Amino acid sequence: MQKSKLELYEEILYALVNKHMTVDAIAYTCDVDCVALRKRLEFLLQQGLVEEKNFRNITCYALTRRGLAIFKTLALTKRLEKLQTTMKQIDEALQAIPSLSEYSAEKAKRQRRNKNY
């Protein structure tokens, strides 16, 4: 399945968080072809999230401060969504516990009745 633009932007930002990378290295990390990647990099450059740096005739890309802030916001949002999902699962489990204890109490009553007969 093909990645959406937003997913690809996120992956590019994630790839560039800790180091400068060439187009080929980013393409390999994000598992996308270089043509599509260049289009996405152009957009990120225009938005001021990524900057070009030249090292010995090699063009590398790095995050700007704005890009790092956007990355941190996206990462925090993902963590909060995951936490929300986990909290829902815990809540559902806690709601199931009283019904289990009611079932166990009813079962114990039936067993006591059967022993008395």
Image (spheres, helix red, strand yellow):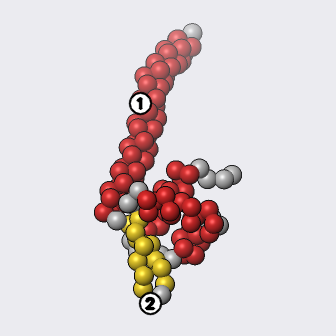
Of residue 90 and residue 6, the one placed in the foreground of this image is: 6
Instruction: Return the residue at label 2.
Output: 56
Q: Residues within 10 Å of mark 2 (few under 14, many from 20)?
A: few
Residue at figure coordinates x 46%, y 35% from the top left: 89
Residue at figure coordinates x 50%, y 62% from the top left: 42
Give residue 13's quadrant in the image.
bottom left
Identify the secondary structure beneath mark 1. helix
- Please provide percent x and percent y for residue 30: 57, 65
Of residue 85 and residue 114, the one placed in the foreground of this image is: 85
| CB contact under 8 Å: marks 2 and 1 | no
Residue 109's place in the image compared with 79, above or below, is above
Identify the secondary structure beneath mark 2. loop
**For the residue marked with disc 2, what is the amino acid?**
Arg
Residue positioned most to the right: 1
Residue 109's place in the image compared with 18, above or below, is above
Residue positioned most to the bottom: 56
Of residue 113 and residue 42, the one placed in the foreground of this image is: 42
- Please provide percent x and percent y for residue 41: 50, 63
The Cα–Cα distance between marks 2 and 1, rounded to whole angstroms, is 57 Å
Q: Earlier in the sequence, mark 2 or mark 1?
A: 2
Of residue 46 and residue 68, the one placed in the foreground of this image is: 46
**For the residue marked with disc 1, what is the amino acid?**
Asp
Q: Quadrant of the C terminus?
A: top right
Residue at figure coordinates x 32%, y 58% from the top left: 66
| Viewer can see residue 77 | yes
Residue 100's place in the image compared with 112, above or below, is below
What label sits on residue 91 in the rendered view?
A: 1
Looking at the rendered image, the disc whose residue lies closer to the viewer, 2 or 1, is 2
